[in-house]
Amino acid sequence: MKLSEVKPKSKCRIIKISGSGNISRRLLDMGCNRGAEIEVIKVAPLGDPIDIIIKGYHLTLRKNEAKDIEVEMI
Amino acid sequence: MKKKEMTIALAGNPNSGKTTIFNNITGARQHVGNYPGVTVEKKYGDITYKGYRINVVDLPGTYSLTAYSQDEVVARDYIINEKPDIVVDIIDSSNLERNLYLTTQLIELEVPLVLVFNMSDMVEASGKTIDIKILSDLLNAPIIKTVGHKNQGTEDLLDAAIKLKEDRYNKKIKIKYGEEIENEIEKISKLIESKNILSGRLSSKWIALKLLEQDKKVIGQVKKETGTVYLEIEQEVGRSIEHLKNILRDDPVTIIAESRYGFISGALAEIHSETGTDKVSISEKIDQVFTNRILGLPIFGLLMWLLFQLVFKVGAYPMDWIDIGFSKLGDLFTRIIPEGLIRSLVVDGIIGGVGGVIIFTPNIILLFLCIAILEDSGYMARVAFIMDRLMHKIGLHGKSFIPMLIGFGCTIPAYMGARILENRKDRLTTMHVNTFMSCGARLPVYILLAGAFFPQIAGNVIFSIYVIGIIVAILMAKFLRATRFKGESAPFVMELPPYRIPTFKGILIHTWERTWLYLKKAGTIILAISIIMWILFTFPMIGENFSQDYDGEIALLEQSFESNEITEEEYEISITEVEAMMGAERLAYSVAGRTGRFVEPVFKPLGFDWKLAVASISGIAAKEIVVSTLGTLYSIQEADEESESLMENISKEYNPLIGYNFMLFTLLYFPCMAGMAVFKREAGWKEMWFQIGYTMLLAWVVSFIVFQIGRIFI
């Protein structure tokens, strides 16, 4: 499934990152590599972006970018 | 003995406490400039320590050294081209895994590296331990523990840098990317070496790695420096990438990045002794409230309201003092300089003009104080988190909200506030539409005109102008995003750093350096423009060419007063009237007045006569001056926005349509010369002229349509 579909308070693991060069490069720079574990924390008050924990820190990204991250639930 | 020199560059992730360390090292001895050709701030300073004169450069905070953002390009180019003696990598100890990603790329660059594990107290408090000795061996670089906000470890850092320089320690380590990738790197680097090109500056292995990563900057450079040979290299790289994609079933970019993370987790696995207690930190607790689904927005609204109140309400007091100060200064010079041109130049031109700019200093100081607190505390990232949905819809970024809000107070700090946006397109779009947030200086114009033409519904009319401004800003942001600043907007992938208590020193330095930039740069340009504006409004002088014999009239009045034919009160009123009429004629005779008449045909289709044209021109100096110019033109001395005689005069001369249209025009054309001076500083000449040009065109077109359609109904 896609990261954008994961409900808050649940954990998942990255399987694959698709998306254009710039976005996937940026995601990699921020620690979103294959196998990295993600905990989705919350959605912003207006419904977008989302707040996740990855590699022990809080990262926020738009659902549009989260669509490019393929994950499996753990 | 001559001091030995050395240069150290501070690299590190944003929010790693890099700037605090920089402040600790250099203290007040620091300077801010720009990297050539870009708007990235360059901070540097120096210190004398143990016989060395150490130059310290604070590189932009980056997560990586790919050519993804301007900051990354600047940081990498500095390290490659300027070859600092030592690169100090500041690392947030509580977030090793991600922070070390940058470190792996510094290792790839083979620069002499000192690692600084900052905020080590946080890690210790959470019960974790890091075996620095083993990690130091694994990464082949000295590791120093620091606590930036307590200024601990600063000397250790400098000692380590000096020791590393003196030892010329040069044992290299390798990041392992896996056999397949390494084979390809080997092939490409051999090819580069065999052609005997690009030798010396960078290792051919690094170039090969970057070519495999399809790094645009490096490709461009190699192309430029290798000429015809490049084709051969390009083919080889293309073959390698295809080959890797085939056997690894993934992009080399991804594989290389993952190898770096693999290297990091390998190293951390050997040293990290985690204690399993995953306590909810204070920062998390704060965020449970501050970015709460329900409470998040009201709290944000409240904080923005407080910010606005602080910047403009509290700022109003020192502004008053500055205002009084400058008028006292004006009075003083009026007394010491005899009446004439010099006095007029000094008092009206220089003191009036420069004073009109200095007066915004309290706003600027308070605004940057607030921004520094918001940034250093970590809340700024939450602002983006909360507002991004809304701002993204109109083509801007979550963080654009703050400069837009500030624009209602004064456009100048708003332009400067746009610095919080890292992406150039976001920043420029935000700046270009900011002017439509009605600033405080436009309010007097609205008050005068709404009071004159719509006395019953003045409040609603003014409100409608504010709303129109917001709508225009939204439309123009969308328009600029679709045309001039087209292209992929920056992906919104941003760290939400833990909340921290900002350091006093950090905030003061932050506020001061930005305020100083405003005073220095804007001040010099504005002095020049003030003098030019004064010349335009003063020359040519009318001399004896008045249409009436005013001197004779004054003499007559004096006579009648002395012979007690009129009372003192009547005398004063009459003299004021005559002087006002003289002032109006003088203005009409000047270059500004003539320009007004000359450009009248351009303004005619908007319903404006030459007087409104002159008033608009004077508004270039500062929008509130429109009011006093109208006063002069309508021969009313000491006119302000509540002057009833001025309202009466203009409401007789124009119809409400023209009045409303003039408000629109005042709203839409660029804010003021001080604003443009700051715009130039922030974005360069080209963008400044674009701002001036497109806002004038927009103002004209909108006013034209409103007048031409409106008059059908009148």
Image (tube, rainbow, N blue to C red):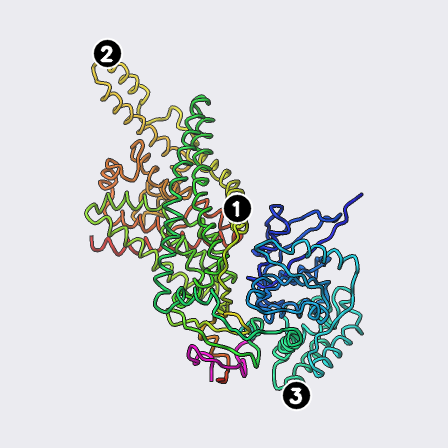
| N-term mark: 2 or 3 | 3
Q: Are the residues flagged by discs 1 and 3 from a single subunit?
A: yes
Residue A54 drawn above or below residue B644:
below
Residue B134 screen position, x and y as percent: 70, 71
Quarter assignment of residue B60: bottom right
Local SS, label 2: loop
User: How much space separates mark 2 and mark 3, taking CA atoms?
Assistant: 111 Å
Which chain is disc 2 placed on? B
User: How much space separates mark 2 and mark 1, taking CA atoms?
Assistant: 62 Å
Classify mark 1: residues with Cα within 10 Å, few (<14), some (14-19) or many (20+).
some
Mark 1 residue type: Trp
Mark 3 residue type: Ile
The image's mark for residue B563 is 2
Local SS, label 1: helix
Residue A61 screen position, x and y as percent: 47, 71
Which chain is disc 1 placed on? B
Q: For the residues carrying marks 2 and 1, which lies nearer the camera in this image?
A: 1
> Tags 2 and 3 in contact by the CB under 8 Å rule?
no
Residue B204 screen position, x and y as percent: 75, 71
Q: Which residue is mark 1?
A: B512
Which chain is disc 3 placed on? B
The image's mark for residue B247 is 3
Number of residue marks: 3
Q: Which residues are magenta?
A: A1-21
Which residue is outermost to the bottom?
B247
Where does the N terminus of chain B fall, quadrant-wise?
top right
